[in-house]
Image (tube, rainbow, N blue to C red):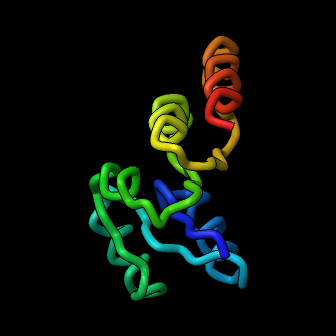
Amino acid sequence: MINVAQIGCGYWGPNLLRNLVANPDCDVKWVVEISKDRQEFIHCLHPAIKITKDLQNVLTDDEVNAIVIATPAESHYSLTIESLKAGKHILVEKPMATEVDQVKQIGTLAKEKD
């Protein structure tokens, strides 16, 4: 069983969340979402999932093994770096970052963190 958190549940996020919830090998612990409307949407569909605006709740949760990043592309790089530094596995929507150098930095950090 892998414990997962998802950051963002806007345009494509609900599809990712639906598939994570349906996967018997995943337990979705958290969704990080800043929009009150989207928080209510998530709560109605998945009342057992904890919802927060604060990414630190997820990054410091030792039970969370992996983070799915489903936010606007401009935020992918920083969220990915923070997640990797916190020791989490990541799955990030495409594009992984908005600059080639950022993708290289992500790859370097991912190798360092194994």
Which percent across, then down, holds residue 6?
51, 60
Instruction: Tell me: 111 left or right of 72.
Output: right
Instruction: Tell me: 44 left or right of 69.
Output: left
Q: Quadrant for the N terminus, please.
A: bottom right
* Quarter holding residue 33: bottom left
Instruction: Tell me: 27 left or right of 44.
Output: right
Pick the front one: 13 or 20: 20
Which residue lies at the image location 34% right of the left edge and 70% below the top edge? 51
* Quarter holding residue 105: top right
* Quarter holding residue 67: bottom right
Which residue lies at the image location 46% right of the left edge and 30% below the top edge? 78
Q: Quadrant for the C terminus, please.
A: top right
Pick the front one: 32 or 83: 83
The answer to whether 63 is drawn above or below residue 73 in the figure is below
Which residue lies at the image location 42% right of the left edge and 87% below the top edge? 48
Which percent across, then down, holds residue 62?
43, 60
Which residue lies at the image location 62% right of the left edge and 49% below the top edge? 89
